[in-house]
Image (spheres, rainbow, N blue to C red):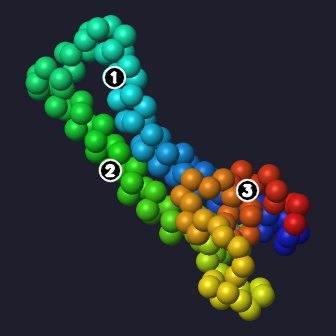
């Protein structure tokens, strides 16, 4: 019973983790994709998009909005790095060993890996997937 409660708790706490990761990715990638699409449309329509840089007041709001959305995305990604994995208690997007199981420090560990990955789909410390699908596996 206690195990099942713990399982429920982990799955529940993965929810905001998924949501924040998606929000950060959207805020970072949407302005880039939209700008790329507009540039492409501009080329395809032979300068048909030049009204976007005409200097009209709304174009300032448009580009500022995209820029601040991206800034928000950067902040969200940084905030996400502080999120903890609900299973192992270490940073979810950060490889850190608060509870080292083999007694090795970070520098002594063999192999190369990303130590920070804000877009990771699984916990960098224990490997728990962000959708909780491998919660029962180990
Ligand atoms: Zn973990």
- Of labels 1 and 3, earlier in sequence is 1
Q: Is residue 24 left or right of residue 136?
A: left
Q: Which residue is mark 3?
A: 129
Q: Please, what secondary structure does the residue beneath circle 2 have?
A: helix
Which class describes the residues within 10 Å of circle 3: few (<14), some (14-19), or many (20+)?
some
Is there any visible trace of residue 9 in the rendered image?
Answer: no
Question: Which sits in the foreground, 7 or 60?
Answer: 60
Residue at mark 2: C-beta within 8 A of ligand 1: no
Give the answer, above or below, for where 58 lies relative to 79. above
Q: Are marks 2 and 3 in contact (CB under 8 Å)?
A: no
The part of the image, by quadrant, that contains residue 94 is bottom right
Q: Which residue is mark 1?
A: 39
Residue 28 x %, y % = 42, 44
Quarter of the rendering occupied by the C terminus: bottom right
- The answer to which image quadrant residue 3 occupies is bottom right
Q: Which label number is shown at residue 90?
A: none
- Please tell me which residue is depicted at 78% across the width and 68% down the height of the picture: 6
Could you say which quadrant of the image residue 17 lies in?
Answer: bottom right
Identify the residue at image location x=43%, y=56%.
76
Q: Which residue is mark 2?
A: 71
| Gap in angstroms between the C-alphas marked 2 and 3 | 27 Å
């Amino acid at each position: 019973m206690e195990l099942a409660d713990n399982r429920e708790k982990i799955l529940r706490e993965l929810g905001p983790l998924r949501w924040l990761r998606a929000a950060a990715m959207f805020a970072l990638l949407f302005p880039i994709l939209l700008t790329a699409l507009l540039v492409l449309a501009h080329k395809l329509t032979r300068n048909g998009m030049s009204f976007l840089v005409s200097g009209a007041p709304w174009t300032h709001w448009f580009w500022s909005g995209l820029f601040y959305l991206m800034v928000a995305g950067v902040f969200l990604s940084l905030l996400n790095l502080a999120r903890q994995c609900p299973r192992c208690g270490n940073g979810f997007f950060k490889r850190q060993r608060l509870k080292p199981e083999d007694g090795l420090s970070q520098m002594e560990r063999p192999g190369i890996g990303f130590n920070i990955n804000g877009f990771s789909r699984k916990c960098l410390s224990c490997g728990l997937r962000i959708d909780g699908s491998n919660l029962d596996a180990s």
